[in-house]
Amino acid sequence: MARAFITGLAGTSVSADERRFLSEADPWGLILFKRNIENPGQVSKIVDDFRESIGREDAPVLIDQEGGRVQRLGPPHWPVYPPGAAFGALYDRDRSAGVAAAKLGARLIAADLATLGITVDCLPLADLRLPGADAVIGDRAYGDAPDKVSAIAAGVAEGLMTGGVLPVLKHIPGHGRATADSHQSLPVVGTERAVLEATDFAAFRSLSALPMAMTAHVVFTAVDALPATTSPTIIREVIRGFIGFDGLLMSDDVSMGALRGSIGQRSAAALAAGCDMVLHCNGKIVEMQEVASNTSELTGAAARRADAALAARVRPPAIDLAAARAEFADMLGQGAGPTAGVSAFRS
């Protein structure tokens, strides 16, 4: 039975030590980063070798393929996609056009991923872009208004799922107000709860039916002194309660600088708080082993949510990729020169 964690790998192939680890520890899934990627054939092989090592053909393989600054697959083998702010700029001029472009862009990303055997994209973001916040979110966000962000995020999720790729909603219940980069240190947000519920938290509410979500390593002092990832109060009252999310809840990467304690302690704390799944990304095998030793087999409600998430995948209908890419470029204004405020799409 799979264990409740998602692992990374060190390089562009599965080493003998990693193969033994995967076989023995049986992580639920794998996440890929730029260090794991060279070309399409190599990516397909590392995906296949991972699944062969754990003996599950349907094991999820994840990636962060947002576009803009966060894009693990890129030239010369894969297109450059715009950041989330590009869809926000279109939305401000024409709401339906902004959502349609976001949906089509995600459908194209799904096509890129599906051919490699990658089945999960850590997208969309429902984080707001707010003044005074750290730039870690920045132009990755779709905007500063909850209804706008929710509408575009829903379009992105629909595009991915139509393409046979599962979305992961992030960073619940919101990273946009943080004044620090949680990769480096722990952000502390002192905003009143009523304001958070009307803004940051609100952006996630209409997206609560999505199959998976990733937590924010952010403290909201109006709710608890612990970061959301390890806070039973935030997970119970805000994520499962106010937002109403009932899908598979995974932590953000437990090796990030925001969290304290050993990797094992962080992993155990996330699960104890109510996360269903621990995410560990850096590919360091000693840490991977510590995560495995501090996570349980996937059972109960967590197993139910994991099974439901995987069951949400559909076989994508046929798509004329050349025509779709041309349509997407036109949506971004490339037909008559780049539209102001909209990043170019290059295939």
Image: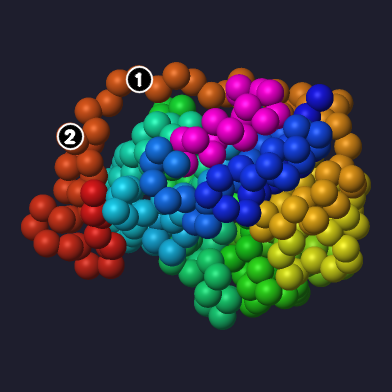
Comparing 288 with 302, the one in front is: 288
- Segment colored magenta: 43-58
**Residue visible at 81% across and 34% down in the picture:** 24
Residue 165 shown left or right of residue 109 in the figure: right
> Which residue is the site of mark 2?
323
Q: Position of residue 16 (x, y in %)?
A: 68, 42
Q: Position of residue 168 (x, y in %)?
A: 58, 42
Residue sitting farthest toward the bottom? 132
Instruction: Examine the image and state in which quarter residue 181 appears.
Output: bottom right
Q: Is residue 46 magenta?
A: yes
- The structure residue drawn at horizontal position 46% and vertical position 54%, both measured from the top left corner, is 72
Image point (17%, 34%), residue name: 323
Residues 239 and 305: in front is: 305
Extreme-front residue of the structure? 16
Circle 2 — which element? helix
> Is most of the magenta stretch helix, strand or loop?
helix
On the image, the x and y values in percent for residue 204 come to 61, 48
How far apart are the two marked residues, 2 and 1, measured between alpha carbons?
Answer: 15 Å
